[in-house]
Every structure is written in C-alpha cells, then in structure tokens.
Image (cartoon, rainbow, N blue to C red):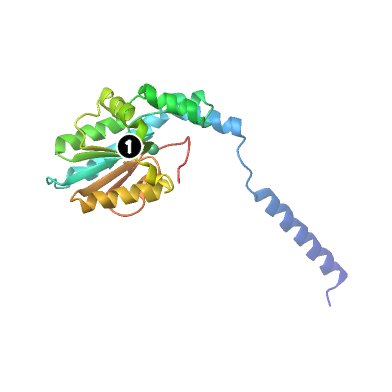
Amino acid sequence: MMSSKNRVIAVLFFLSAIFIFQSCATVPTNLSLAKEEVINYYESGKYEKELDKVVNKAIDEFRDIPVTDSSAVVFDIDETTLSNYEINKKLDFGYVPGLWDKWIEEAKAPAITGVKRLYDFLYEKGFKLIFITGRKEYQYNSTFKNLVNDGYKDFDTLIVRNSDENNLTAKEYKSKIRVELTQKGYKIAGDVGDQHSDLDGPDHGIQVKIPNYMYIIK
Ligand SMILES: [Mg+2]
C-alpha cells in the first residue's frame, strides 16, 4: 500500500510528465513566417549555393561513368531545369490551375543555371538527355519552346504525361516511363529531379536531388 507521501510524489511526477510532454509537442511554423523564410532562402543566394554543391557532387559522380551510344540521363522539368519561382511567389505559393497553365503557355520560365551547367557537362560527355515531365500533352509545344529558348538544346526526347497516365501518381508515372525507356534499349545512368517521386522506383542510376522548398509532389 502506497503511503500518502509517496502518493503525492507519484501524482507530482505524473503531472510533471504531462507538462514535459506538452512542452515537447511540435507545433507548426506560422504560415506567413514559413513563406518569408522560403522567399529569403531563394532571394539571398542560399538556394544557388546549395544547388551548386549538389551539381558539383553530381558532376564528380558522372565524370568517371563510361558512356556508350545508349547511355542516357533523365531530367525532370519544373523546379529542376526550369524555375517557376516567379509564378509561385506571385500566387503566394498556392496553385491556381488557369494561371499556372497561362504561365506554361507563355514559355518564359528561366533556366535553373546550376542544372544547366550539369546538362551541358553531360551533353559534352555524350549522354543522351531525356526530359520526363508531369506536364500534359497540350503543353508539349510551349514546354519544348521554353527549353530550347533557355539553351536546353539537342536533347534526345521530351516526354509529357498523356491522358491514359493521368490517374498515376508522379512516382508511378515516372517509373513507368523509365522502365519503358530501358526496354527500348536506353541505359539510364542518372536521374535528376527536385522531387523524391522523380527519383524513386526502378532504373534511376545516379540520383541527383535538386532542392525545392516550395512544394512536394508524391
Ligand atoms: Mg519538378
């Protein structure tokens, strides 16, 4: 039988445990502050610094890979090769389908220069360069134009998502396309993307994760 003194100690211990648990419970960052933090990251040069480190490491990894006629590297487009920071910020980091479509149609997304440096390095080494994007078939022409205008020239293939693939998750869709490319004879030496859903799954080779602090696509 617990003495009354021990009972008081036990109750105090229990209350302290609740207090500590509540103090440690995580709370979200205020959304306005989180957005400010993201804007500061992108506009203060920190993003480019992080990206340069990622690209330098990738170039080191690709440097010693032997290249054959079938060697290919896959690139995602949005937030990997082309930056949509301008429209994302304008939309306060929300998604408005009509305005997003208009932005893609205008084909004026700037190249992400660090990734362009990796693209040029891989092109010089003789890799075939393939874009796999979640953008839709009706956006093919404007996407092609945007890539070429930004200096992403001489790529092998641009693959957009067709209507049969709309029900697939990004990871399922991108994995499916990589497997199809492999079946056609391409040897995928690497995969460059800003989302884990660009990189996970079969046939990815060297995975290069480009930073993106604006959104997540699963
Ligand atoms: Mg992307």
Mark 1 residue's CB less than 8 Å from ligand 1: no
Which quarter of the picture shows residue 192?
Answer: top left
Q: In this view, does 15 lie above or below 47?
A: below
Q: Which residue is drawn at 62% across and 35% down?
A: 30
Question: Farthest residue toward the bottom?
Answer: 1
Residue 91 as seen in the image, left or right of residue 161? right
SS at badge 1: helix
The answer to whether residue 93 is seen in the rendering is yes
Give coordinates of residue 46: x percent, y percent: 41, 30
Q: In this view, does 84 lie above or below 69?
A: above
Name the residue that disc number 1 marks. Answer: 53
Depth check: 140 or 150 in front? 140
- How many numbered markers are drawn? 1
Give coordinates of residue 169: x percent, y percent: 43, 48
Q: Is residue 190 above or below residue 119?
A: below
Q: In this view, does 170 lie above or below 101?
A: below
Q: Residue at x 21, y 29 (%)?
A: 153
Depth check: 178 or 3 in front? 178
Question: Farthest residue toward the right?
Answer: 4
Depth check: 138 or 100 in front? 138
Rate crowding at label 1 as few (under 14), some (14 to 19) or many (20 or more) other CA atoms within 10 Å: few
Q: Residue at x 76, y 61 (%)?
A: 14
Q: Which residue is drawn at 49% across and 27% down?
A: 98
Residue 1 as seen in the image, left or right of residue 130? right
The answer to whether residue 204 is seen in the rendering is no
Kind of residue at disc 1: Lys
The picture quadrant for ligand 1 comes to top left
Give coordinates of residue 105: x percent, y percent: 38, 24
Which quarter of the picture shows residue 160?
Answer: top left
Depth check: 63 or 194 in front? 194
Question: Farthest residue toward the front?
Answer: 164
